[in-house]
């Protein structure tokens, strides 16, 4: 294609003596080409051009070309081409320029791309800016000489970076003179005249610029955290300025900007210390949680959860001021779980396990109470998500209060739902089958923690027989019941015995799901009958007879998909047969497959299917599965009869 021809032409120029000049000319002509694909390929091969022409030419001619294209208004290149450009102006390209001392130059070239309305271009430009800021050490120009800078970092003056952030965010700083009045109270003068050299102090206060377009604000929100992280911890005033800028954007007129600002808070929580969280972050969160747009309130739940994880993991003590912040974050989480918008409540469900795990016991109880209410939420989406998160929340909570507060609500609600074929509530009608299926799976998972009554579990299993979708969902989690082997072996045995009827279920998908659990079911039946000891011959023979009947039903199933699924499960079934009765049982399974292929056997329940060629195809697939088993089946020594050829 055009891109390959471009690359080969560049390789040829590199082999020539004057490769820098030729490579640069080729790049220039390619980005001016009529074909958009050629222009895109040229931008994607920007690193190759940089290697060909050398650092000096990169900083000179190449950067002049790139800067002209990135800052053109309106853009002369398509979004796809500009996106490729932004993607390649990263840390690796900085090395091609000659080193990290040219960091600011590359940042300034990316800024126009970070202001673009097109999301793909803007996002890629911001991603490159974040990668560049990872090698920057933001320093205060007034005290740069006194601040140690790591060897792998490039000093970047705060005054320059501040102007970039202010320009992107649409914020200007007004100089205000603050003086002390005679009575001791502070007075503020906005006059240009000095109040007095000894008594006046100049303070810069940020202020939003009206009618600033939104793309730059979105980009600025994503840059706050990496700039903050690159600052020396001693730059407390400058760090607080970043949070001041963010506090302006969380009250922006456009909801999408406020969403971006709320999202930036999550990134900042990973780099700010606990004192900053208490003084600056908590008020910002309070503003966001009172926002009129539910998308903004939904976004801040992630930041609240992040704060809970960080503060709780740090081990906040009762006398520690950070313990007050942790309690405040739990209060914020509680407010979000009761939010009028179901999307915000859904966000709290999504983060429930992360919020519960690190908390002390007294605060865990508050979150658990919120979760118990969400399980009975009026919105089906919230209830469904809560049900799916119950097992994870139980494991994260790791306290008896969860079983006391949540499990009774779960059991009562599920008993009521099992008795109903559908919901009378229009809001739940569409999600009712999914909700009931999810609750059934939840009961299986809770049973593995011994958290629900066994009679409830038996009710669930019996109810699933009449609901194919519910049955399929539960069979996928059937192995979770292994925990019952320790607490109630007879209950596990009875459940497995009842499940044998699924081998003849009218829905072929249910039969497939049961086939996948066949080995597990019979292993539990035999083990429980013998009290966990080695099974005697009579028990094994009785189980083998039932086991072989289920295999026979699967071999002669009338649905091709069911037979194909049986073939997939056959290696596991053979391994279990070997464990159950050794080589004799394995030989019997292989013989059943061979006899079906040769036509010397028929299904006792469906003799009419003997002569159908489709079953021979399934038997061939089964033989292939047996032959490719690892380790190989050592009992496969049958002579295949040659089928008679049809006459002309």
Image (cartoon, grey):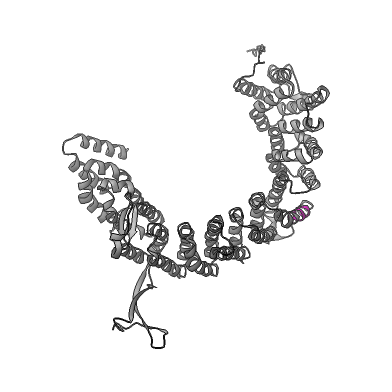
- What is the residue that sits farthest to the front in this orientation? 319
| Left or right of 453 on screen, residue 509 | left
Q: Is residue 23 among what the camera can see? A: yes
- What is the residue that sits farthest to the bottom in this orientation? 182
For the record, the magenta segment spans 409-416
Residue 633's spot in the image, x, y percent?
A: 64, 19
- What is the residue that sits farthest to the right in this orientation? 538
Residue 107's spot in the image, x, y percent?
A: 31, 56
Give the position of the C terminus as an image quadrant: top right
Residue 105's spot in the image, x, y percent?
A: 27, 55
Rendering quarter of residue 156: bottom left
Rendering quarter of residue 245: bottom left
| Left or right of 584 on screen, residue 251 | left
User: Residue at point 33% right, 82% down?
Assistant: 199
User: Residue at point 60% right, 23% down?
Assistant: 630
| Left or right of 637 on screen, residue 8 | left
As drawn, 220 above or below 488: below
Q: Main secondary structure of the magenta part?
A: helix
Give the position of the N terminus as an image quadrant: top left
């Amino acid at each position: 294609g055009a891109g390959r021809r471009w690359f080969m032409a560049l390789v040829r120029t590199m082999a020539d003596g004057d490769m820098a000049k030729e490579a640069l000319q080729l790049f220039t002509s390619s980005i001016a080409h009529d074909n958009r694909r050629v222009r895109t390929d040229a931008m994607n091969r920007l690193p190759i051009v940089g290697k060909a022409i050398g650092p000096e030419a990169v900083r000179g001619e190449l950067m002049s070309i790139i800067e002209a294209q990135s800052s053109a208004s309106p853009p002369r290149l398509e979004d796809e081409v500009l996106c490729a450009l932004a993607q390649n102006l990263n840390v690796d390209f900085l090395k091609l320029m000659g080193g990290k001392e040219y960091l600011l130059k590359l940042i300034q070239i990316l800024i126009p791309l970070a202001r673009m309305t097109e999301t793909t271009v803007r996002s890629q430009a911001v991603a490159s800016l974040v990668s560049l800021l990872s090698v920057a050490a933001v320093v205060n120009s007034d005290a740069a000489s006194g601040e140690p800078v790591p060897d792998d970092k490039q000093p970047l003056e705060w005054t320059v970076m501040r102007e970039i952030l202010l320009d992107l965010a649409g914020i200007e700083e007004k100089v205000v003179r603050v003086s002390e009045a005679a009575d001791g109270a502070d007075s503020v003068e906005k006059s240009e005249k000095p109040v007095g050299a000894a008594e006046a102090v100049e303070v810069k206060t940020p202020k939003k610029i009206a009618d600033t377009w939104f793309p730059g604000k979105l980009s600025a929100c994503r840059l706050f955290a990496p700039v903050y992280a690159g600052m020396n911890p001693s730059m407390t005033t400058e760090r607080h300025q970043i949070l001041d800028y963010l506090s302006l954007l969380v009250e922006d007129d456009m909801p999408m900007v406020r969403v971006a600002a709320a999202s930036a808070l999550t990134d900042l929580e990973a780099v700010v210390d606990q004192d900053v969280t208490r003084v600056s972050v908590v008020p910002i969160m309070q503003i966001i949680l009172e926002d009129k747009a539910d998308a903004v309130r939904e976004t801040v739940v992630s930041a609240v959860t992040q704060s809970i994880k960080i503060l709780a993991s740090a081990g906040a003590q009762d006398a520690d001021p950070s313990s007050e912040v942790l309690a405040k974050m739990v209060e914020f989480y509680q407010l979000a779980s009761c939010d009028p918008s179901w999307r915000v409540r859904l966000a709290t469900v999504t983060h429930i396990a992360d919020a519960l795990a690190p908390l002390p016991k007294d605060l865990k109880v508050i979150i658990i109470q919120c979760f118990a209410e969400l399980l009975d939420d009026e919105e089906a989406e919230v209830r469904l998500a809560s049900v799916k998160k119950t097992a994870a929340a139980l494991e994260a909570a790791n306290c008896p209060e969860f079983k006391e507060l949540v499990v009774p609500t779960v059991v009562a609600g599920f008993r009521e739902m099992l008795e109903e074929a559908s919901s009378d509530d229009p809001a739940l009608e569409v999600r009712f089958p999914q909700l009931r299926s999810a609750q059934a799976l939840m009961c299986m998972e809770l049973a593995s923690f011994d958290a629900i009554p066994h009679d409830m579990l038996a009710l669930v299993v019996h109810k699933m027989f009449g609901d194919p979708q519910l049955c399929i969902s539960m069979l996928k989690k059937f192995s979770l019941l292994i925990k019952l082997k320790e607490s109630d072996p007879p209950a596990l045995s009875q459940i497995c015995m009842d499940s044998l009827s699924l081998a003849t279920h009218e829905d072929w998908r249910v039969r497939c799901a049961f086939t996948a659990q066949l080995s597990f079911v019979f292993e539990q039946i035999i083990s429980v009958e013998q009290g966990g000891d080695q099974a005697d011959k009579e028990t094994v023979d009785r189980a083998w007879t039932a086991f072989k009947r289920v295999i026979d039903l699967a071999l002669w199933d009338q649905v091709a998909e069911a037979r194909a699924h049986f073939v997939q499960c056959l290696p596991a079934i053979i391994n279990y047969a070997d464990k159950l009765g050794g080589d004799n049982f394995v030989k019997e399974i292989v013989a059943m497959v061979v006899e079906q292929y040769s036509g010397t056997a028929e299904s006792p329940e469906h003799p009419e299917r003997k002569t159908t060629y489709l079953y021979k195809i399934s038997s061939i697939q089964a033989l292939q599965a047996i032959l490719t088993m690892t380790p190989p089946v050592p009992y496969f020594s049958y002579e295949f009869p040659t089928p008679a050829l049809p006459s002309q």
